[in-house]
Amino acid sequence: MPIISSEPDSGVALTEVTALVLEQLLALAVHDADPDDVTPPLGSAAGWNPERIAWFRAYHRAACGLDGPAREKTWAVTAGGAVAGSVRLRRVPDLSGPGHGVAVETGIWLGRQFRGRGIGVPALLLVKAEAAALGAGLLVRRRQSRCSGPAALRRRRTHPRRPARHRPDHPGLTAASAARPCTTRTDMPIL
């Protein structure tokens, strides 16, 4: 696997999405991630259906660079040499401007077995370095779905007397977050 960035202390790296890595990502996603965390809602069948699998492959094949037709680039996130998930950069023309130059948006998903193991932050630091190397001046992080684990952790840190209530039927999802959609945005100037 050609590693393009690595964080030596964490064992986390970003790896090019080759044909082999794409199939490893897909296997991880199907067996260890909720399809709504990884793909848009597609097809009439719930869960990982043929439409979602086709979209997943087409998306990663098209996301070959910020200057390509998709204006997006994806990498596999590896931890200790194992494929753990994926991270992306996408040009955001409506936020680019004289104040900060090119703006890019990032997103990340990790397989359930890799969550909570200190992989996400190093992966986002690596993608931030990639964004800077590509000339970006602003990195935007958006999450548009159910507020799950990360949002529950933010609420717990902010309101320690109101711990998140975990739902036994869906590990990692809180009772309050399941009922409402959530959109968060974090802007990070790249220095």
Image (tube, rainbow, N blue to C red):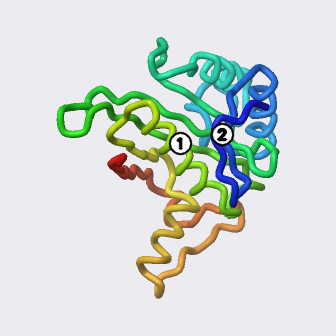
Left or right side of 121 for 169: right
Quadrant of residue 103 within the rendered picture: top left
Q: Amino acid at mark 2?
A: Leu
Would you call the spot at circle 1 few (<14 residues within 10 Å), some (14-19), or many (20 or more)? many
Farthest residue, direction left: 98
Residue 187, horizontal then vertical, whole percent: 34, 49
Farthest residue, direction top: 69
Would you call the spot at circle 2 few (<14 residues within 10 Å), some (14-19), or many (20 or more)? many
The answer to whether marks 1 and 2 mark residues whose Cβ atoms lie closer than 8 Å is: yes
**What is the tally of numbered marks visible in this picture?**
2
Q: Residue at x 75, y 50 (%)?
A: 79
Q: Residue at x 77, y 46 (%)?
A: 32
Q: Residue at x 81, y 45 (%)?
A: 81
Q: Nearer the viewer, residue 56 or 180?
A: 56
Circle 2 SS class: strand
- The label on residue 1 is none
Circle 1 SS class: helix
Left or right side of 108 for 71: left
Residue 45, horizontal then vertical, whole percent: 69, 29
User: Which residue is identified by label 1?
Assistant: 127
Residue 46, horizontal then vertical, whole percent: 68, 34
Q: Nearer the viewer, residue 178 or 32?
A: 32
User: Which residue is identified by label 2?
Assistant: 14
Q: Amino acid at mark 1?
A: Val
Q: CA distance from mark 1 to mark 2?
A: 8 Å
Could you tell me which quadrant the N terminus lies in?
top right
Quadrant of residue 94 within the rendered picture: top left
Q: Nearer the viewer, residue 11 or 188?
A: 11
Left or right side of 49 for 65: left
